[in-house]
Image (cartoon, rainbow, N blue to C red):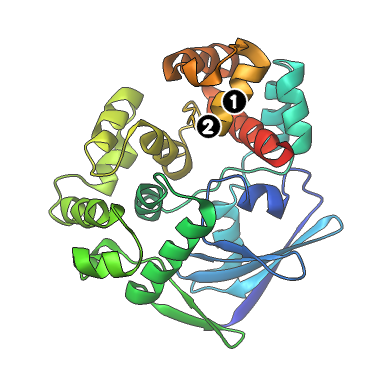
Amino acid sequence: MKEQIYIIENNASFEPKHIFECGQCFRWNEEQDGSYTGVINKSVLNVNKQEEKIIIKGISQKNLEEVVEEYFDLKTDYEKLKEQLANIDEHVKNSIVFGKGIRILNQDLWETIISFIISANNNIPRIKGIIERLSKAYGEEIIWQEKAYYTFPTMEQLAKATIEDLRKLGLGFRDKRVFDTTKLFLDQEITIEELQEEQEIESLREKLLQLPGVGPKVADCIMLFGLKRLEVFPIDVWVRRVMNELYIKQEDETKVSKKQIETLAKEKYANLAGLAQQYLFYWKRETA
């Protein structure tokens, strides 16, 4: 594979730090120069912001411009979406100013499902470490600039792992969940295609909840980050905290129910709830 380069100019809705550190992905790592390097399917890319330019270079079996446009959703007008959300209230407006460069990526659905099963009751450095070890053990090696990178394993590749193998990679209680989920997909009891084709959000949620290790929050993350369902509003401790502080104002935030937050998010943000969640989550976590 030959190294390619692609430059994005004057895009006010593209900030690498915002994109890669807002909790939506786990395969991007910051370099010493502030750029980020990551693996997308069978491509290895480095993303570097220099003044108003985003310089993306790397190796890919495909045309780099096509890979970048699809993955970073460059055909979506984020300026227009931000304007819509900013008109809702000052709170959302302030969070957008803070995380103005966030874009929701078009990630591979299989990778997203397994990654978020691994994310349950876990922290980001540990999640990234597990996924890296999993990819090194079962994915394909790609050498770029004298360094080895690894593709995320396909379901066929991951099926080679026993529960014991997964345990040795540090998955903990998630080992059986990843193993069982892989088997369900391989046996076609559920397919990637049927998840992608399901239009009704509650039916989609029910299908995802059948997967071992997928609870309500993980299902919502998969819908937002793997299926681009922007109406979904995943709720974790940071989101509960920010929604309570800004709107609900309950003395004990742990008593605020998921249903209460979901109803409020639907009323306020409608079909852009998932994007609002990213701005609010990133703002609250980074300024805590």
Image position of 206 (left or right of 249): left
| Residue 212 to residue 267: above or below | below
Q: Is there CB contact under 8 Å for labels 1 and 2? A: yes
Could you say where residue 47 lies in the image, as x and y percent from the top left?
Answer: 68, 64
Label tally: 2
Quadrant of the image occupied by residue 34: bottom right
Name the amino acid, label 2: Val
Q: In the picture, residue 96 is in which quadrant?
A: top right
Q: Which mark is residue 279?
A: none
Estimate the x, y position of residue 158 in percent, counting from the top left: 26, 66
Q: Quick one: 9 or 150, which is closer to the camera? A: 150
Residue in view at x 73 percent, y 34 percent: 79
Q: Give residue 257's position: percent from left, percent from top.
A: 45, 16
The residue tagged 1 is: 241
* Residue 250: % across, % down: 58, 11
Q: Residue most toward the bottom?
A: 146
- According to the picture, the residue beneath numbered tag 2 turns out to be 237
Residue at the location (47% across, 13% down)?
260
Q: Locate residue 65 relative to residue 194 in the image: left or right.
A: right
Query: What secondary structure is found at the residue carrying circle 1?
Result: helix
